[in-house]
Image (cartoon, rainbow, N blue to C red):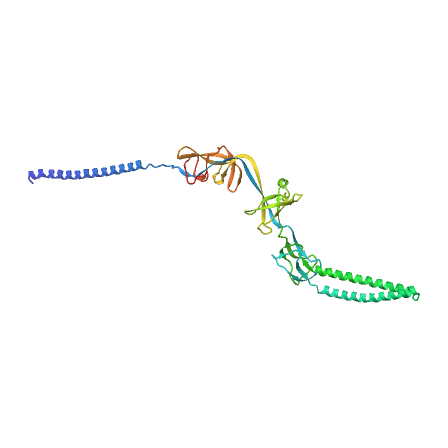
Amino acid sequence: MTDEARAAQPKGLWRSLGRHLLVLIAAGVIVSAAAGGIAVLHMRALAEAPVDANPPLTVRTMTLDKRDEYATEQRFAGRIEAARETRVAFERRGLVDRVLFDEGDEVQAGAPVAELDQSKLKAERKRLEANKRELQARLALAERTLERQSTLSRQGWQSEQRFDEARFAVDELNATIEKIAAQIEAIDIDLEKSVLRAPFAGTVTARHVDEGAVVQAGAPVLGLAETSRIHARIGVTAAVAEELVIGQSYPLAVGDRPVRGKLVAERPDIQTGTRTVTALFAIDNPGAPLGEVIELIRTRTIQQPGAWLPLTALVEDRRGLWSVYRVRGEGEEKTVQRRTVEVLHSRNGRAFVRGLFADGEQILRDGTNRVVPGQRVILSEKIAEN
């Protein structure tokens, strides 16, 4: 190799290295520019859309309406019953011939409801009637004989003995005829009592026997309830019983349906088991079957300031107390504050409470599990309640 060739070889190597170095530098510049652009875009996006870790919640509230009093409602339960109810029965023993009504049938007062077999009684009556006619015929003859003996005795043709015998024979026959008449009357009474009649108008509640049964005197045949007059039998406390007035009308309820009842009677004693006084109310149209539960409603006004709140607004607190969330603040965003209240009375999903609050304050109506004291909230105008 010549000296010129050796001198040219290092120059070519350096030129090759220079070209590769330029390529690497250019690539680095491009990568750096791309990374810088991405970082700029990311920071710009962060600047344009800031993130809030605790955004305000949308809640609905109600305006507090303070009252000086509240009404409590007491309910006393009882049952609807017929004014009169009985189990009709025959007064004599016998074979049941007919039962004319079934359960649920309406019966008029005095209507026959059942009959006993009367064949033996009717046969006995016919026999006694025949005996009576026989005795009446003998009596007619005895009276004629007495008349003749009386004439002969006055003329002196007959002894006093014969006259007395004729007179006593007439008296004996009259007594025997009266005895037969009494027996016939007793049979007529038994025939009348063989027909069982309704003591009052009502509805048959039970049928205890059927045709062909032999019943004893006093054995129940049909159950009868006077459905034209309905009473409510309700047990009340002695204090409430003193407030009730005979003849006045009071509010009652059968389930959710209100009715009116007039107090007709109160028992003078207290039931030992329930410690209540029984009150009877006359009701015209309860619209419920006998035995249904009916309630007396008594309202009492208590002078105590406070406000009515829905139960959904209450939060359980310490020592048996409760709390509510009060919404305070100006502008669109507000905050909630916790206030302790005391529940005085509750009914129908509401509670009457007292506490340190002012009339017209905004109280969180529901959703109390979503907020904590100091929580930022926004009132929803569409669902906020006044």
Residue 158, position in %: x, y? 92, 66
Residue 104, position in %: x, y? 60, 56
Residue 237, position in %: x, y? 62, 41
* Picture quadrant where residue 262 is located: top right
Residue lying at the far right in this picture: please name it.
Answer: 156
Q: What residue lies at 82% left-to-right and 62% top-to-bottom?
A: 174
Q: Nearer the viewer, residue 102 or 272?
A: 102
* Picture quadrant where residue 175 is located: bottom right
Q: Nearer the viewer, residue 235 or 298?
A: 298
Count of marks overlaid on the render: 0
In the rendered image, which quarter contains the N terminus? top left
Residue 180, position in %: x, y? 78, 63
Please determine whether, in this image, residue 90 is positioned above or below residue 51: below
Q: Nearer the viewer, residue 385 or 371?
A: 385
Left or right of residue 71: residue 327: left
Please determine whether, in this image, residue 289 is positioned above or below residue 240: below
Please determine whether, in this image, residue 318 is positioned above or below residue 257: above
Q: What residue lies at 56% left-to-right and 37% top-to-bottom?
A: 301
Q: What residue lies at 89% left-to-right and 65% top-to-bottom?
A: 151
Left or right of residue 330: residue 261: right
